């Protein structure tokens, strides 16, 4: 949201790899100037944004994608598997965002 507020158009988003619908909804709400929806979606996504950078990318987003069945959890060098506490942060943020039960 801060990027859009500064005049940005679109983005290259790590979060959109695991929450494409929510990210798209945020951008469409911004275009409509529906700031209530923008703020609601931004609050919902912010913990996920933070969790996906708890370790060096793309480790956390790769793990998140595996939770959705979109990619295998295994990593090959130079990417390393993320720590268990990071996995819990990603899982918790995805659950909070409504992406997992």
Image (tube, rainbow, N blue to C red):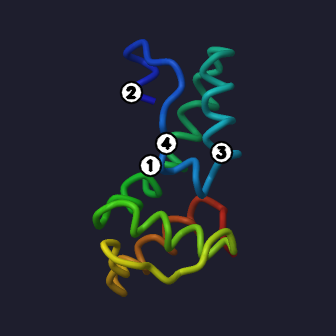
Residue designated by label 2: 2
| Above/below status of 6 relative to 62 | above
Q: CA distance from mark 3 to mark 4?
A: 12 Å
| Above/below status of 97 relative to 68 | above
Q: Earlier in the sequence, mark 3 or mark 4?
A: 4
Residue at the image position 42 percent from the left and 12 percent from the top = 7
Instruction: Give the mark toward the camera: 4 or 1.
Output: 4
Q: Are marks 4 and 2 in contact (CB under 8 Å)?
A: no
Could you tell me which secondary element the residue under label 3 belongs to?
helix
Residue at the image position 59 percent from the left and 79 percent from the top = 72
- Circle on res. 22: 3
| Above/below status of 30 relative to 97 | above
Residue designated by label 1: 46
- Circle on res. 7: none
Q: CA distance from mark 2 to mark 3?
A: 16 Å
Q: Are marks 4 and 1 in contact (CB under 8 Å)?
A: no
Q: CA distance from mark 3 to mark 1?
A: 11 Å
Could you tell me which secondary element the residue under label 2 belongs to?
helix
Q: Determine whether, in the image, residue 23 is placed left or right of residue 61.
A: right
Label 1 crowd bin: few (<14), some (14–19), many (20+), radius 10 Å = some
Where does the image place residue 2, in percent across and percent down from the top left? 39, 27
Q: Earlier in the sequence, mark 4 or mark 2?
A: 2
Q: Are marks 2 and 1 in contact (CB under 8 Å)?
A: no
Residue designated by label 4: 13
Where does the image place residue 30, in percent across and percent down from the top left? 60, 21
């Amino acid at each position: 949201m801060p990027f859009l507020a500064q005049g940005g158009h679109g983005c290259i988003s790590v979060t959109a790899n695991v929450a494409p619908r929510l990210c798209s909804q945020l951008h469409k709400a911004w275009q409509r100037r529906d700031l209530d929806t923008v703020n609601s979606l931004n609050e919902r996504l912010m913990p996920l944004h933070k969790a996906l950078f708890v370790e060096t990318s793309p480790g956390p987003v790769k793990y998140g994608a595996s939770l959705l069945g979109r990619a295998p959890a295994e990593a090959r060098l130079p990417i390393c598997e993320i720590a268990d506490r990071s996995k819990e942060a990603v899982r918790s943020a995805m659950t909070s965002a409504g992406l997992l039960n």
